[in-house]
Image: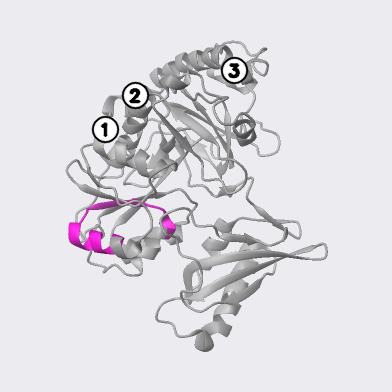
Amino acid sequence: MGALGSERIAPGFHEHAIETMERAELEALQLQRLAATVDVVKERVPAFRERLANVATPASLDAICGIPFTKKSDLRDNYPFGLFAVPRNEVQRVHASSGTTGKPTVVGYTAEDLSMWARCVARCLRGAGIEPGWMLHNAYGYGLFTGGLGLHAGAEEAGISVVPVSGGNTERQLMLIEDFAPESICCTPSYALTLAEQLPENNSLRVGVLGAEPWSELMRQQIEEKLSMIAVNIYGLSEVIGPGVACETADRSGLVVMEDHFYPEIVHPDTGEVLDEGEVGVLVLTSLTKQAFPILRYWTGDLCSMTREPSPCGRTHARISSIVGRSDDMIVIRGVNVYPSQVEHALLGVDLAAPHFRLVVTRDGTLDNLTVEVEPADGVGSVEEVGSSLGASVSDALRSSLGIGVAVTVAERGALPRSEGGKLSRVDDRRSL
């Protein structure tokens, strides 16, 4: 079947009146909710009482600039429940980030928080073109990670049946997709490529809602061509709520932010100054309705741009671009900032290269070196046959994209890590070893 050869997938709505609210009405609602959130944090979160002592209840949305940023370090410093605004017996669920160092960042939800989250995700799924009555193959991980349960509840809210397969066990995933014939799938984009390597092109999938890691337009094209479906980008992070903060609709004209619940800003990564629409900077998010874990001006570290122009489907909420990198995971090689997404974009433009890669960072004395490990694409020949030309092509593409020369190693097909449902780490930083 596949969406690319069938009728056009059109965006739907879950809460039409809210999603198409007039801008002035939406901003009045945001101000009302922002003022209430600031007052709640000042009153109920002792850890922030001193920080917010000189912050008045906002009288305009512009006043948000006078509120200090919240960073991930604030969550770690107040581990586990120090930033909660309700007693623990009112917290119906907790989630935690999938951090690789130190203790995780812990977030909590009241029953009303969970209901709001489900409605936001339902908007995302309906906007992506998934219809009530369809089946969703949910390959996000269940547990402390917000992805699996977040998408699950949103799908049920939208009247979509769910296959809660979670991550990993790729053979079982392939069997269930072929046997159950779901029309839609949720997973990371890297895992979608893993599945695409073995699923037939004439599978049942029509829409994929993919996120939890950066991906490029070229990667989207490969996923869509191999799986014969449309692929839309969903965005979220556990510190703000989880998946469902923003999502592309089926027309893929930017990720629509659920602005009645999350106020977005784009700020300069060095100065924190709010940037104009269209400029790339750090995405900062303020929750407007969360009860258990309200968060003010959270510095996401994600780099993107934003517009408040209405989207083609009639939605009036702000739209952000796809994430182009992170302000805090960039690799600095000989004074040049390098993001894995830049490497991915360059690599996917090389015909001989597979969409799998790894960045290995080493240090020779005081000099940092970057080696990019790649694999040959299917059907182009063995490493012995194409390794030399592939390495040269990737090196040229990276030099053009990054402005520096990097070493390229061609690995055997299948040698590099594949996603098993969770985030795939693209960087092997050996400088600290």
Looking at the image, is mark 3 or mark 2 earlier in the sequence? Answer: 2
Residue 8: x and y, percent? 23, 52
Looking at the image, is mark 3 or mark 1 earlier in the sequence? Answer: 1
Judging by the rendered image, the residue that carries numbered circle 1 is 14
Q: Disc 2, disc 1: CB below 8 Å?
A: no
In this rendering, the label closer to the viewer, 3 or 1: 1
Q: Which amino acid does label 3 sit on?
A: Ala
Cα–Cα gap, marks 3 and 1: 31 Å
Would you place residue 202 above or below residue 86 in this image?
Answer: below
154 magenta-colored: no
Residue 140: x and y, percent? 38, 49
Q: Can residue 385 be seen in this view?
A: yes
Residue name at image x 76 percent, y 56 percent: 335
Q: Can residue 254 be seen in this view?
A: no
Q: Which residue lies furthest to the front in this view?
A: 89
Q: Nearer the viewer, residue 337 or 88?
A: 88
Judging by the rendered image, the residue that carries numbered circle 2 is 21
Quadrant of the drawing holding the N terminus = bottom left
Q: What residue type is labelled 2?
A: Met
Q: Which of 417 and 125 is in front in this view?
A: 417
Looking at the image, is mark 2 or mark 1 earlier in the sequence? Answer: 1
Judging by the rendered image, the residue that carries numbered circle 3 is 63
